[in-house]
Image (tube, rainbow, N blue to C red):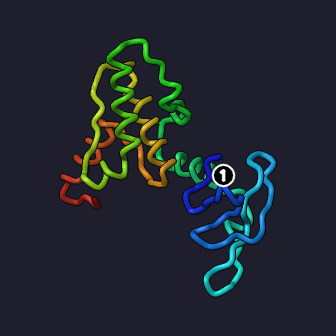
Amino acid sequence: MNFPREYQLDEKTGNWTYKGFECVAHMTCPEHGKYPCVYRDADGLYHTINDKRCPICYRNEVIEREIGRACIPARFKTKTFENFETPEAWQKMAKETVRSYAEQFPENLAHGRCMLFLGNVGTGKTHLASALLRSVIEQGYTGAFVGAGDLIADIRDTWRPNSEM
């Protein structure tokens, strides 16, 4: 099961920790099973976790909310690396390059590396860009989908003397 990183399960004992603190109460999600809902901090105080909600359900809700805010075109909101069909070898290479960039996103971000998608209509640029953005959001970052035409128009708008940008 893929719980958020602040939750840790000791495989040997079956005991949970949350942000390093002992979990003392659990609940059961019908979809994801047992999860911790209360922890005891270093001072012995008890705290509920995410209003006792399943952390996987909660994380998925946050991801879907952020995807909704990211301005991904409607027909591309569900696009992933897994559902990218790659009939051509060069498309497979592009997919793996973008997937690798996504998997190494924290390092790429820290070093200021970006990715630019260029190509003819119908080659998979929007699908791969949407999959990349989804992956980045799933890692806890935020982002926005901006088409080249919109970006250029926004830049041009800043050139006006009375621009608010």
Q: Kindly identify the residue that appears in the image at 42 percent across and 38 percent down.
A: 132
Q: Kindly identify the residue that appears in the image at 44 percent across and 42 percent down.
A: 133
* Residue 119 vertical position relative to residue 102 in the rendered view, above or below: above
Quarter of the image where the C terminus is located: bottom left
Q: Kindly identify the residue that appears in the image at 27 percent across and 44 percent down.
A: 114
**Which residue position holds label 1?**
56
Check disc 1 and give the amino acid type: Ile
- The front one of 154 and 33 is 33
- The front one of 147 and 6 is 6
4 sits left or right of 130 in the view: right
Extreme residue in the bottom direction = 43
Q: Position of residue 61 (x, y in %)?
A: 64, 51
* Residue 165 vertical position relative to residue 49 in the rendered view, above or below: above
* Residue 129 vertical position relative to residue 83 in the rendered view, above or below: below
Total numbered badges shown on the rendered structure: 1
158 sits left or right of 15 in the view: left
28 sits left or right of 106 in the view: right
Badge 1 local density, few (<14 within 10 Å), some, or many (20+)?
some
Extreme residue in the front direction = 12
Q: Kindly identify the residue that appears in the image at 67 percent across and 56 percent down.
A: 12
Q: Position of residue 30 (x, y in %)?
A: 81, 48
Quarter where residue 21 is shown: bottom right
Q: Position of residue 69 (x, y in %)?
A: 51, 50
Instruction: Describe the element under mark 1 as helix, strand or loop.
Output: helix
Q: Where is residue 127 in the image (x, y as percent from the top left)?
A: 44, 29
